[in-house]
């Protein structure tokens, strides 16, 4: 299992910034804060499930799929933070918490997410090394080239299909995690598979016990659509449309993290909905910094980048999506041109 990339600044332009951040105390753990906000999240989740039981005989119960999807995204943020060792000082505690939160509460594999996400942090936006650059979407013309059939149609229209595809992301994340675990040695995967299995029993058992089959199925669908869209809309604006690395591109740590990442402005509401991960540049520079400290580090990082002449991009939420969708549209332009040429010739 890949371990979180800890901060190392020797021999780079990153060292002075690291000293400033460390002197400000922004790398210190905030365990009491995490205990408080995790407790609130769990209490709200319990209240939502209680509401499902109370309103089980009304179609209004489907409205509770919305807060459940949002609160599940908040829970995913905490599992993410555990993977980065942000909450406490014990690696073992983080791993136990992450597996319990990911597997039992969300039905997702913490080990799979941690492996994938740490590889992303090590090589953000690298066409060969970043696992987030690939899959159904094509982020470069080279990846789009040669796609045919349904895959080709999806790629040609990927910019306009991006948001609809996010409705499937919640289910895709869970499927990918189980597939990853099934490919591991049985002893290593047993715990997480057991937790995910228990989650599925409790989740579907409760819904089908208190709701009619039709309502239960609609609830599951809406819940996972909200979860997928919310989670996808948090992570999508951070790197799409930024610098792409290829082959043996040699950049220093700070250049690699800053030039491939983009911050999203918007105030307290945006900060809450995106869990503070809208300060993506700071998160990539200091992945083990408590997420709630990122906004305090932001002005220091922006000022330091200005002093050393390193471009630092921060945009509004709508603009960030516009940049990302435009990048997807341009990456598939050649495929659309080839399709048009074939159609013209026929």
Image: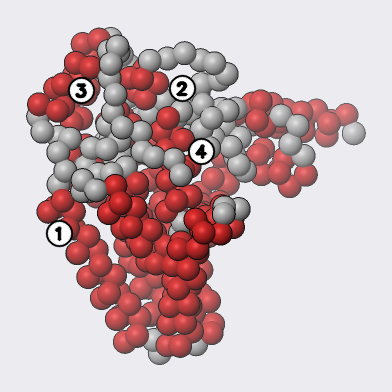
Query: Observer-nearest residue: 23 or 297?
Result: 23
Crowd class of label 1 (few under 14; some 14 to 19; many from 20; radius 10 Å)? few
Q: How is the image coloured?
A: secondary structure
Q: Which residue is mark 1?
A: 36
39 shown above or below 131: below
Q: Circle 2 sits on which residue? A: 243
Q: Earlier in the sequence, mark 4 or mark 1?
A: 1
Give percent across and percent down for residue 30: 14, 47
The residue indicated by pointer 4 is: 132
Q: Is residue 72 above or below residue 153?
A: below
Q: Position of residue 33 (x, y in %)?
A: 14, 52
CA gap between label 3 and label 1 equals 28 Å
* Dot 3 or dot 2, earlier in sequence: 3
Labelled pair 4, 1 in contact (Cβ < 8 Å): no
Q: Nearer the viewer, mark 2 or mark 1?
A: 1
| Secondary structure of residue under mark 4 | loop
Residue 100 lies, in percent from the top left, at: 36, 62
Which callout, 4 or 2, points at the residue further toward the start of the chain? 4
Q: Which mark is residue 18?
A: 3
Dot 2: what SS?
A: loop
3D distance between C-alphas at marks 3 and 2: 23 Å
């Amino acid at each position: 299992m890949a371990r979180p990339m800890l901060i190392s600044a020797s021999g780079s332009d990153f060292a002075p910034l690291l000293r400033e951040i460390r002197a400000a105390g922004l790398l210190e753990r905030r365990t009491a804060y995490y205990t408080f906000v995790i407790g609130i999240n769990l209490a709200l989740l319990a209240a939502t499930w209680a509401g499902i039981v109370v309103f089980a005989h009304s179609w209004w119960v489907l409205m509770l799929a919305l807060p459940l999807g949002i609160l599940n995204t908040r829970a995913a943020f905490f599992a993410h933070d555990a993977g980065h060792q942000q909450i406490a000082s014990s690696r073992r505690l983080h791993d136990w918490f992450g597996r319990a939160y990911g597997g039992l509460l969300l039905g997702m594999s913490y080990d799979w997410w941690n492996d994938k996400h740490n590889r992303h942090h090590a090589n953000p936006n690298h066409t060969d090394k970043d696992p987030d650059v690939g899959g159904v979407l094509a982020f470069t013309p080279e990846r789009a080239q040669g796609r045919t059939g349904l895959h080709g149609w999806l790629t040609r229209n990927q910019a306009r299909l991006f948001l609809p595809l996010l409705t499937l992301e919640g289910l895709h994340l869970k499927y990918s995690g189980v597939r990853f675990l099934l490919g591991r040695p049985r002893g290593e995967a047993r715990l997480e598979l057991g937790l995910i299995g228990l989650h599925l029993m409790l989740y579907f058992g409760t819904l089908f016990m208190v709701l009619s089959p039709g309502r239960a199925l609609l609830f599951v669908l809406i819940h996972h659509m909200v979860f997928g869209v919310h989670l996808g809309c948090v992570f999508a604006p951070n790197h799409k449309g930024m610098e792409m690395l290829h082959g043996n591109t040699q950049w220093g740590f700070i250049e690699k993290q800053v030039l491939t990442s983009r911050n999203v402005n918007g105030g307290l509401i945006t900060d809450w909905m995106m869990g503070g991960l809208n300060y993506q540049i700071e998160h990539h520079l200091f992945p083990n910094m408590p997420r709630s400290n990122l906004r305090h580090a932001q002005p220091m990082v922006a000022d330091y980048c200005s002093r050393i002449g390193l471009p630092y991009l921060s945009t509004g939420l709508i603009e960030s999506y516009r940049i990302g969708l435009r990048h997807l549209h341009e990456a598939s332009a050649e495929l659309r041109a080839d399709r048009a040429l074939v159609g013209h010739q026929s």
